[in-house]
Amino acid sequence: MPSPLILVNLKTYKEGTGSRAHMIAQAAELVAKESGATIGVAPTYIDLHPLCHHFAIPVYAQHVDGFEPGAHTGHVTADAIKAAGAAGSLVNHSERRLTLADIEASVRALQALKMTAVVCTNNEATSAAAAGLAPEYVAIEPPELIGSGVSVSKANPDIIRRSVATVRAVNGKVKVLTGAGIQSGECVKIAVDLGTDGVLLASSVVKAKDPGAVLRDLVSKL
Ligand code: G3P
């Protein structure tokens, strides 16, 4: 079985930008090497290319537009993030919602370049719709728990269980992540035991004094 994906979204936190983004990516690379776990980061666009260049971990964009390269202004294409070295992108994060048609365009644009699409969803119904688009991952995150410090694994294991079953029923090839409030090895273990292929998280790592120590704890029960 491939090792679960621990994907750290750096969002636009000050503590996840510039030199801190480098520090977190370096810690992720070290902990991944020590533990054999797969740890990725999703920085802002500004930090995407430097992190891809300096660190041997998967780096994801936080959003991608489903446009062909050309006359668009203020957008980011799959070609641009691929050229920067990204492995893929989050799509439809709760903090960057899209229409279903836009989600499909972003997924297709990524897949045309053999990149990984991680489509975020907020409940079981949207997880089913996302799975119908056949992305590589669906990431279920109850919005009310995002950034709350309360872990979805403990507060709402049922939504994880149901979403895993729903996604599998729609398309058995789509992998499932879960997120919101994930902060410890125990949260990760519960998520994986419930059938997910890993977790998507942010604040517990990004805002930590010692992100490496949190990452070590996150992978400690795998
Ligand atoms: O993208 C991950 C995120 O939305 C969860 O955030 O801070 O609850 O881990 P957090």
Image (spheres, rainbow, N blue to C red):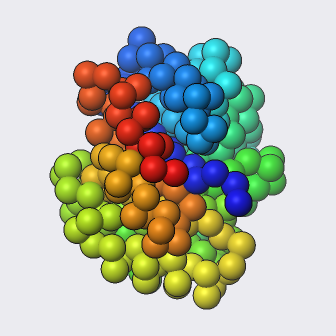
Q: Position of residue 81 (x, y in %)?
A: 66, 34
Q: Compared with residue 209, is residue 66 higher up or lower down, i.e. above or below?
A: below
Work out whether residue 126 or residue 206 is closer to the camera in this orientation and state it. Answer: 206
- Residue found at x 33% / y 73%: 157
Q: Position of residue 76 (x, y in %)?
A: 59, 38
- Residue found at x 48% / y 31%: 43
- Residue found at x 45% / y 43%: 220
Q: Position of residue 93 (x, y in %)?
A: 43, 55
- Residue found at x 40% / y 25%: 212
Q: Quadrant of the N terminus?
A: bottom right
| Res. 52 image quadrant | top right
Q: Compared with residue 58, is residue 184 higher up or lower down, i.e. above or below?
A: below
Work out whether residue 186 or residue 93 is closer to the camera in this orientation and state it. Answer: 186
Say if residue 83 shows up in the picture.
Answer: yes
Q: Is residue 58 left or right of residue 152?
A: right
Work out whether residue 138 or residue 107 is closer to the camera in this orientation and state it. Answer: 138
Work out whether residue 39 or residue 203 is closer to the camera in this orientation and state it. Answer: 39
In the displayed orientation, state which residue is furthest to the bottom.
169
